[in-house]
Image (cartoon, helix red, strand yellow):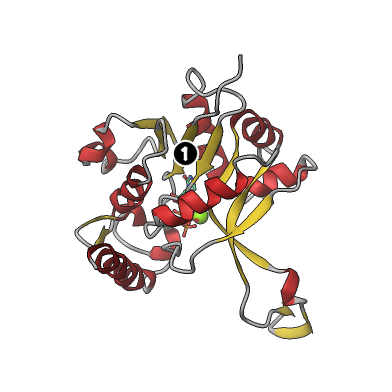
Amino acid sequence: MSHSPKFWAVVPAAGVGKRMNADRPKQYLPLAGKTVIEQTLTSLLRAEVFSAISVAISAEDPYWPELAIAKHSQVVTAPGGRERADSVLSGLMVLGGQAEERDWVLVHDAARPCLTSHDIHRLINTLMDDPVGGILALPSHDTLKDVQSQTIFGTLDRSHVWRALTPQMFRYGMLRAALQAAAGNPAVTDEASALELQGWQPKIVEGRPDNIKITRPEDLPLAQFYLQQAQWGEQA
Ligand code: CTP
Ligand code: MG
């Protein structure tokens, strides 16, 4: 008997936020009345599609247990790993008893708090019948240069270049196998690259440009602006 696959979310949140250079990991910095990670998890909960959200947290993290959202009935905690891919695999393993091989998993960075329900549903609706799955991405608008030692060696063909965002949506079993096969490979910086190494060809779905990743200090006021814009949009 076959039934429709469920949807699960995995949120890697075990990074230290080195480039942010703050007094704590960037996911715990204040943003529009909450912390960054609370904004991110709220954006996932609001979509009302996930059976559970698995959040990978570092063993040395004193901030997470203090947040009310850590005890939310749909939120489960997984141990973080050394690299982002290790944290994602750990988040998948914690869902092992419940998720089926062909269920869908959406992996979303804790550091992307401006995700809209619109983008989540667009990704799901576009890829639900796809054999592999895919990712939110944005075309590159800037002219791209091939540079070594601050010298330009050429201009890249921009029409083939997209920026990978999250969520990235794949089947539970296929994603776990691809991440296990890719263990320790530094080239695997997102889920799609792990599947690509297995010979799969993930799809891209164009996302919204406000789905930014908080990376450096100047990204926080920009994220606050986007979140406020979204709130006004809801009220209007
Ligand atoms: N992440 C994780 N486990 C790691 C490394 C990163 O779960 N070992 C998570 C981060 O918490 C973040 C996401 O992966 O939500 C994207 O990573 P990135 O933006 O690079 O965050 P950091 O690694 O924390 O930042 P930096 O690279 O500046 O140190
Ligand atoms: Mg990092």
Q: Residues within 10 Å of mark 1 (few under 14, many from 20)?
A: many
Q: Which amino acid does label 1 sit on?
A: Val
Q: Which residue, as the protein is rendered here, is positioned at the far top?
A: 1
Q: Is residue 104 found left or right of 155 in the rendered image?
A: left
Percent of width and height locating residue 235: 22, 64
Work out whether 218 lies above or below 113: below
Give the residue displayed 43% in from the left and 68% down from the top: 210
Residue that carries the numbered disc 1 in the rendered image = 10
The reply to whether residue 167 is in sight is no
Percent of width and height locating residue 158: 72, 76
Q: Is residue 63 found left or right of 131 in the rendered image?
A: left
Give the residue displayed 41% in from the left and 68% down from the top: 216
Give the residue displayed 46% in from the left and 38% down from the top: 9
Q: In which quarter of the image is the C terminus?
A: bottom left
Percent of width and height locating residue 152: 75, 85
The quadrant in which residue 219 appears is: bottom left
Front residue of this view, candidates 212 and 136 = 136
The reply to whether residue 19 is in sight is yes
Q: Which residue, as the protein is rendered here, is positioned at the far bottom?
A: 151
Say how many tags the image has.
1
The quadrant in which residue 154 appears is: bottom right
SS label for mark 1? strand
Is ligand 1 less than 8 Å from the beta carbon at label 1? Answer: no
Give the residue displayed 40% in from the left and 31% down from the top: 52
Q: In which quarter of the image is the N terminus?
A: top right
Front residue of this view, candidates 18 and 64 = 64
Work out whether 126 lies above or below 224: above
